[in-house]
Amino acid sequence: MNSELTQNKTENLAVVSSISNLDRMKGGTQSVFLQTCVVDLRFQNTWVEANLLFDSGSMRSFICKNLAERLNLPVTRKEHLLVYTFGNREPSEKIFDVVKVMISNKKQPEKSVECKLLVSDTITNAVLPTPNLTIERLIETNHMAQSDLCLSQSNKEIHILIGADLYWHFHTGCIKKINKNLFCVETVFGWTLTGNNNLRKNMDSIVENLCFCEHQSNCNSESYSLEDINSQMRKIWEIDNLGITYNIETESSEEETLKQFERNIKFKNDRYEVKLPFKDEVNMTSNFNLAKNRLKGLASRFRKDNSLYENYTRVLDSQLTDGIIESLNTENLNQNLIYYMPHHPIIRNDKETTKFRIVYDASSKEKNCFSLNDNLQAGPNLNPNLLILLLKFRK
């Protein structure tokens, strides 16, 4: 490997969770078809036939190494990936070559798309099911060429995986329903079959794909934080567990916040007042510089738009009179608990009532600092339970 190429063409760092395959042998009652088709790969004067799998659950697209070598595809750059394999907490770092190749419709070569793909030793080892004679007849009945659709019986190896980065470049948006469970989706390469049938008895192959990537330009592995990636991956799995798991610690914290709210609420001068529900440990910076810069930008807008200045002044005067805001002397206050909150106008001329209002940004913070909202308890979610809403919708 040319060391100069490795050094100069390494662009970014990504985090990827692996593709996992689950096979259930004998005793299954259905086969699930993934979107596959047969295409031509072209580079210069060389072309080869390849099996392609569409997978919107992957954020990147791949080509198997032996096919890239067969076409002598030149490496345009390299990408660093942190690969999370199924069931493992710690990632392994890998470097993938990036190649460029033309993918064409076998029957209509003019329908071609040039793609940048990551080179992988293997796409998947799963044996994907192919349509049986009954399904082939259903396809022919709907006037769709069976050769466009699926892998050949003799060669079921997947050579290319098209992920979400390229997925919608190939789809026309046309979908045909074959029966209750089977659908054909049209792409520039032809029709792809997806869904399940209840006819095959010998084998079920369940392929579960997830490829999660996060890019940072011009960074290195030493400066990349795994905590953010772990947090995002945790959120993905929490969605799978919706309505199953129960977080006792979170529930207890929410109940305590609600009790604190009920203890501190007061009715004073014809309105309700309540203390801010601060967390046990408050770690807050003043946010002065950010608020000052926001104010300078707002003042610049005032100089260009006098009506904006007049409306802003009118709303602030009204809030001052109503006691919503008040003048404050910071000299006698604890400097560690002062937070400067930026504000900006929201103008909605389409509204019948409040066309102009001022928004106070309690989430603003400087780099590596904490905002006011970061130091406040969120409290219980007062929105309707999402799972219950979905179940009611199905009814």
Image (cartoon, rainbow, N blue to C red):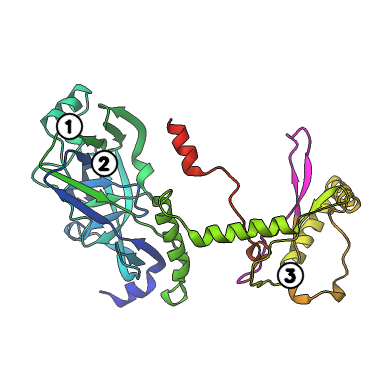
Residue underneath mark 1: 146
In percent of the image, x 60 and y 72: which residue is there? 368
Apparent side of residue 258 relative to residue 98 in the rendered image (left or right): right
Vertical placement of residue 384 versus 240, above or below: above
Residue 218 at least partly seen? no
* Mark 2–mark 3 CB contact (< 8 Å): no
- CA separation in Å, label 2 and label 1: 13 Å
Instruction: Look at the image and tell me in which quarter the N terminus lies.
Output: bottom left
Residue underneath mark 2: 35
Counting residues from the N terminus, which is met first, the one under dot 2 or under dot 3?
2
Disc 1 versus disc 3: nearer the observer: 3
Counting residues from the N terminus, which is met first, the one under dot 1 or under dot 3?
1
Q: Is residue 361 magenta?
A: yes
Secondary structure, mark 1, is: helix
Residue underneath mark 3: 289
Q: Is residue 167 magenta?
A: no
Q: Give the camera-side residue of 201 and 290.
A: 201
Residue extent of the magenta highlight? 344-368
| Residue 215 position in % (x across, y down) | 44, 62
In percent of the image, x 70 and y 57: which residue is there? 261
Q: Residue furthest top?
A: 141
* Mark 1–mark 3 CB contact (< 8 Å): no
- CA separation in Å, label 2 and label 3: 53 Å
Residue 278 bears which disc, if any?
A: none
| Residue 88 position in % (x across, y down) | 31, 67
Q: Give the camera-side residue of 354 and 192.
A: 354
Amino acid type shown at disc 2: Gln
